[in-house]
Image (tube, rainbow, N blue to C red):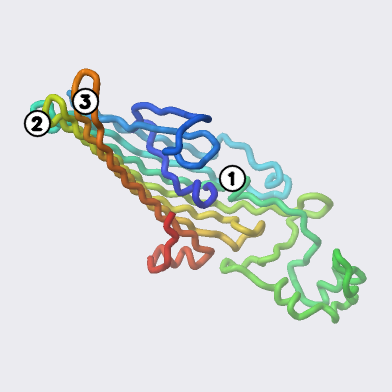
Amino acid sequence: LTPFGGGGIAIPAPDTLQEFKVQTSLYDAQYGRGAGANVDVETRSGTATLHGIAYYFGRNEALDANNFFANTTGVPKGEFRRSQPGGTLGGPIPGSTQRAFFFVSYQATRDLNAASLSNSVSSLTLPAIPQVRTPATLGAAFGGHAGALGGVTIAPDGSNINPVALKLLNAKTSNGTFVIPSPQTSGSGVNYTAVVPGHFNEDQFNTNLDLNLRSPDRLSAKFFFSNSNQDVPFFGANVPGFPVLRSFENRNLAIAETHIVSSRAINQLRFGFSRLVGQSLPGEIGRAHVLNPVTSRLRM
């Protein structure tokens, strides 16, 4: 659950990596304009013998502590569950007489997170807004007070409360809760905490193909595929009811032909294709899009 743009960059599964390199400065223009660290990764290739692995990573919130403010306001501990099954397989292509090799991998990520302080948990200090929001109850709670920046003093019976403000205070989300909530506890300081689980789902696939065409020539092709969806509960608001749904599609293709000219010179021809398509849709619009994927897209 990361910001749009950075959140769309897929990360290959660790078991698919052969090596990586981190460059913090003094790298040339081919790595783009970013001033921060640049990370290069090289995915694995098939070997002369068949090898494969299967793995599963899982976690839950059983041993996690509750958020401090959620515990203070009596809100139960949020769920935090991640499931990551996957596997790899690589080796020679049958019948290729050890001249062609393949490597494939797949990983699925299913993440339910109600512990993220930036996207799933919101703690507020709210005024004592009653659960029954009529002019009389609001007047009883706030009669004699003006706004934080001044304005009309509220009458004890609430008769001078603006109808628009009354409508806003009684607005509800699709699950029946108030858009502007009431405190969960009395007293000063933080008196309201919302814990709403976010979701992240990803499926990624990687394949490498290496061909020894003849003694001085080698052809290599690598393709990486990833689709992911993020359901972010809090986006542009610190109360529930304003989620955003993001989806990303990553496609990366790299082809290289290496020719040994002599003991002192080689020639390498490279072709690369990279495509990242992302979209960010608010609230119920985003959920409807999952069922009916007809919308404009932002290409990056």
272 is higher (above) or lower (below) than 287: above
- Marks 3 and 1: CB-CB under 8 Å? no
Quadrant the C terminus occupies:
bottom left
Residue closest to the far right: 144
From where the camera sits, is residue 207 visible? no
Q: Label 2 vs label 1: CA separation?
A: 50 Å
Q: Secondary structure at mark 1?
A: loop
Q: Position of residue 84 (x, y in %)?
A: 40, 39
Query: Residue drawn 70% across and 65% down?
Result: 180
Depth check: give the residue in front, 211 or 120. Answer: 211
Q: Label 3 vs label 1: CA separation?
A: 41 Å
Dot 3 or dot 2, earlier in sequence: 3
Disc 3 residue type (three-letter):
Thr
From where the camera sits, is residue 6 visible? yes
Query: Residue drawn 38% across and 36% down?
Result: 13
Disc 1 residue type (three-letter):
Ser
Q: Secondary structure at mark 2?
A: loop
Disc 2 residue type (three-letter):
Ser
Instruction: Tell us which disc is closer to us: 3 or 1.
Output: 3
Dot 2 or dot 1, earlier in sequence: 2
Depth check: give the residue in front, 194 or 248. Answer: 248
Q: Which residue is mark 1?
A: 116
Q: Which residue is mark 3?
A: 47
Dot 3 or dot 1, earlier in sequence: 3
Q: Position of residue 48 (x, y in %)?
A: 18, 23
Query: Residue drawn 22% across and 29% down?
Result: 46
Query: Residue drawn 73% across and 45% down?
Result: 72
Q: Position of residue 222 (x, y in %)?
A: 27, 39
Which mark identifies residue 96? 2
Question: Which image quadrant is residue 297 in?
Answer: bottom left
Q: Is residue 89 left or right of residue 74?
A: left
